[in-house]
Amino acid sequence: MKIKLLASVISLGMIIIGTQASAATHPQMTNDNGSPVGDNQNSQTAGENGPVLLQDGHLIQKLQRFVRERTPERVVHARGTGAFGEFIADKDISKLTEAAVFKPGTKTPVFVRFSTVIHPKGSPEELRDPHGFAFKFYTTQGNWDLVGLDEPVFFIRDAMKFPDMIHSLKPSPVTNVQDPNRLFDFFSHQPESTHMLTRIYSFRGIPSSYRKVDGWGVHTFKLVNAQGEVTYVKFHFKSHQGNEGYNIHQAMAEQGKDFNNLTNDLYNNIAKGNHPVWDLYIQTLKPEQLDNFAYNPLDDTKEWLGVPETKIGTLTLNKVPDNFFQSTETVAFDPSNMVPGIEPSEDRMLQGRLFSYADAHMYRLGANYQQLPINRPRVAVHNYNQDGIGDQAQTDSDVNYQPSVTEGSVSDNPAYKAVQTTLSGTTQQKLISKTDNYEQAGTYYRSLTQQQQDDLIEALGGDLAKVKNIQVRQAMLSHFYKADTTYGTRLTMWTKDNIETIKALAKKLN
């Protein structure tokens, strides 16, 4: 009897000790107002079988917050993966720009977000798509956002066409299914898209790893030095890990094994200490050199082929975010976020993005989205933007206007005025004079290996064979033929063979 009693005492003591240890290692659960929660398992009810009480503030808050967990999905770049890192500048380019981020030896914290452009959140990462490669540099002069792609060019050159292009690439408003008939109907009217389509239907359209893609700013920008002199620039991040991608068969096989392969590959390698690295290169042109090409260098459907590159720094990604939503989902990249020494060029597509990106973020996250921790600059912010949902500025001055004689009021500085650009001519609405829609697409096709060309023909020809409108299909084939006769001829034959196969199969099924 004594032995049983002793055992009971010991057991009770262990329970008490365990409870004390548990209380010590687990913080007290609270509501959003900080008040402690007494029961997170059971709702307050009117007796054993009575209804749930509206006064149960903890229950109400849990349900309210749960149905508000999702911000509106990005229209484009919805499926994303982010990581933290640092950029180290290693070449003196002060003759080109006064941007502090490029001062040799400067280490700048960076957040990078990789993404697919068209497909929704949760979609398989092996689907063919352009891929975003966006950078937020937390510089000593404020945040600089370089919002680019894993390709050096884009489909269109004018922001006027962007909503239509995205509508054609997204699922049909009737069937909610993506349809090659819709996208090629649109692109058959956009010959400048030939280059980007060729790249996307090659191995680059389905990368095997985010570590194994290059990053481009795509657009032309301006570097401005302390004397106000302008140099046009393109940015290119070259991967130390090389460039790799899947053909359609490899992608389907990988999707069956892991449809989150790009995220898992990036995060697993960073966790192991295998930190991916990219070198930043720039290409530069003086304003007087812009007319030296058969194409317009400000056209974002073009590369600057033959213009030498100069390495100016290195980017390393070394930390996985602690929380997906608070970093990757709420990060807001905006091409208009620039710093002294970097300005936009007259690139028509870039000019449209300078408005649309900030406007999209204000819709998704509210007017104060740049006060969120992931978007907040690492330098003090002083202005009179005020109020609105999510405002955390904690202003304490009666002065919310400028200019003012009041001590402590903010002032501007003419040293940071935008550079003056000489203008000529009249306002207009017309196509650029130098289009050169096909040459670079042919150059890229001929740069591929025989196997890569075969994979391109199979992927692109397979989708073209699904196009029912003969006029649309012929227009697309003519674009590729003008890029390279062999390319166009092979696509035509492949498409014809696939159409016959589809017809035969349909006849057999009927």
Image: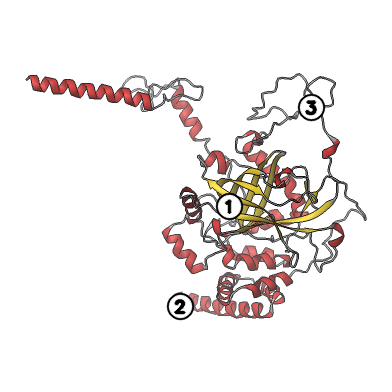
Q: Amino acid at mark 3?
A: Val
Secondary element type, mark 1? strand
Answer with mark 3 or mark 1, whichever residue precedes in sequence: 1
Counting every numbered tag in the picture gives: 3
Mark 3, other Cα within 10 Å: few <14 / some 14–19 / many ≥20: some
Closest to the camera, between mark 2 and mark 1, is 1
Looking at the rendered image, the disc whose residue lies closer to the viewer, 2 or 3, is 3
- Mark on residue 115? 1
Given this view, does label 3 or label 1 mark the residue nearer the observer? 3
Question: Which label's residue is closer to the chain start, 2 or 3?
Answer: 3
Seen at 90% across and 51% down, the residue is 422
Mark 2 surroundings within 10 Å by alpha-carbon count, few (fewer than 14), some (14 through 19), many (20 or more): few
Residue 444 relative to residue 11: left or right: right
Residue type (three-letter) at the residue carrying disc 1: Ser
Check disc 3 and report the residue beneath it.
Answer: 410
The residue depicted at 69 percent of the width and 70 percent of the height is 441
**Between marks 2 and 3, how big is the CA–CA gap?**
77 Å
Identity, as a three-letter code, of the amino acid under mark 2: Lys
Name the spot of residue 246 as percent of width and height, x first.
Answer: 52, 66
Side (left or right) of 458 relative to 184: left
Q: Which mark is residue 508?
A: 2
Residue 338 x, y percent position in the rendering: 74, 44
C-alpha separation, residue under disc 3 versus residue under disc 1: 38 Å
How far from the left and from the top, in percent, is residue 498? 55, 77
Counting other residues with Cα less than 10 Å from the Cα at mark 1, is it few (<14), some (14-19), or many (20 or more)? Answer: many
Q: Is residue 465 or residue 455 the one in the foreground? A: 455
